[in-house]
Amino acid sequence: MWKLKIVLPVLAALVIFLFAQVYLVRQVWMQKDEVFSLRYRSESKEAIEQMAVHDPYNGFKKAYWVIDDVSGLYLERSRNLANAPDSSIFAKNLRDSFTSILSEDQLLTEHLGKHFRKLGLESRIKSKIYVNYIDLIDVQEKINVFRASDEMLRKQSSQKSIPVYTFTSEGNNYKISFDYYIDVANKEAIMIKELSLTLIFSFISFVIIIVIFIGTLKNYMEEKRLSNLKTDFINNMTHELKTPLSTITVAAKTLRHKTVISSPEKIKDTSRMISKQSVQLNELINLILEISMWERTQFELDRKVTDMESVIREISDNFINGCGSKCRYTDNIDLKGVKAEIDLLYFTTMINNLLNNALKYSGKDPEVSLQAYPRNNYLVIKVKDNGVGISRSDQKNIFDKFYRVSTGNIHKAKGLGLGLYYVKKIAEEHGGFVDVSSKKGKGSVFIVNIPLNN
Ligand code: ADP
């Protein structure tokens, strides 16, 4: 739940940031587009003005001549048409015919292309003609016979094309006004190239923000996880310390009881119980102190070359004695002449931790086995049980400090989550490693590998 509370605002912030980036890039794109059009338009205008010095028709001479010729024919047809319902169809035909003449029989586009090439601009351009109006005129009677007007033609100017110039021309039978537009080839590609730095910068900043967000989120979650682990640890530790303490308190009270004072046997029993609980308390406190020491000081083992068969045999025998009738225990120790350089105390505690866990996390009829043999220059010790098992996701964490597999709020088995952390640390300090293989409900096998002394 708390994860969702953190992730949602972060996701919302990322989406807002992404929208802001898209908006910014769009604005920059629109500005670039305007600047691009302005540049081509002003260069075109300059070229047109230069051309006008030696060509007053701006390259449209042939087109105007053809239009004049054709408009004579249209004039005859238009005399009966003025104001007739199909006059707008006639106007559109007139426009299409004049547009294609103006597009094809002209030299302006070629001239502009050359001009752009000289300036190092894109020279592949296409022209577009948009007619504003056409008048068909009877020169002798001095009357305007037909006007193909703006409204009739419903001019469709293109958004992508760049408006360059408005031309007007008058002949014997016509008058025309039209807009001259150009389309620059690869306009988008040119603009993307020009914008590449902005786009790259925007992309990089987005990636950086995402990385920072994810990093911060991960850190926060890790902090939260550790803080939860610590809280659990403190709760467990209080519980673990309280149990022997209250036993000792009760035992102390019992000692004052009349019936106990009079019976030396009962005094002995109670005092045995007190010392057993004190030893447990002492061991617990030592474990906590020792692990906290590892954090602050350099951890050093006192290693000696040791005959492993006798060491493991002793650990195994002690475990059988402790286990008693509570479990079925078997061992298979195949270590004749095998030697390893170990710190006896730490090594023994490490294997005992695994054996005790095997018993602690077993069901009703515990079956525990210990196997030890040499393999590939390693001493392999396998501790197997038929207990509750560990899920795959928990297997990744069980060797972490304070980690305990969650079983709701109440833990059936007591513990501080330090046993396996200890096992891993000691195995690694010996130059070895630990592995686990387990299935939920099907038992577990812990495998310790310690390098051999050859
Ligand atoms: P503790 O036993 O004090 O909780 P450990 O570090 O020894 O701490 O173990 C960490 C967790 O790993 C335990 O809480 C338990 O859930 C799981 N675990 C350890 N050994 C076994 C085992 N043999 N079978 C099942 N679960 C185990």
Image: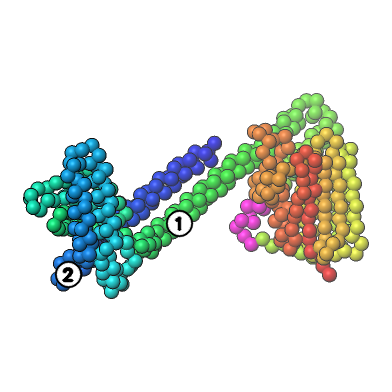
| Residue 448 shown left or right of residue 206 in the figure | right
Task: In the rendered view, tell whether residue 212 sits above or below residue 264.
Answer: below
Q: Say what secondary structure mark 1 lies in.
A: helix
Q: Which is nearer the N-term, disc 1 or disc 2? A: 2
Beta carbon at label 2 within 8 Å of ligand 1:
no
Image check: 362 left or right of 133? right
Residue 66, which numbered label? none
The stretch drawn in magenta includes residue 378: no
**10 Å crowding of disc 1: few (<14), some (14-19), many (20+):** few
In front of the other: 43 or 271? 43
Q: How crowded is mark 2: few (under 14 residues within 10 Å), some or many (20 or more)?
A: few
Q: In which quarter of the image is the C terminus?
A: bottom right
Q: Name the residue under label 2.
A: 55
Q: Residue 208 carries which label?
A: 1
Q: Residue at x 86, y 55 (%)?
A: 372
The amino acid type of the residue labelled 2 equals Asp
What range is drawn magenta here? 288-298
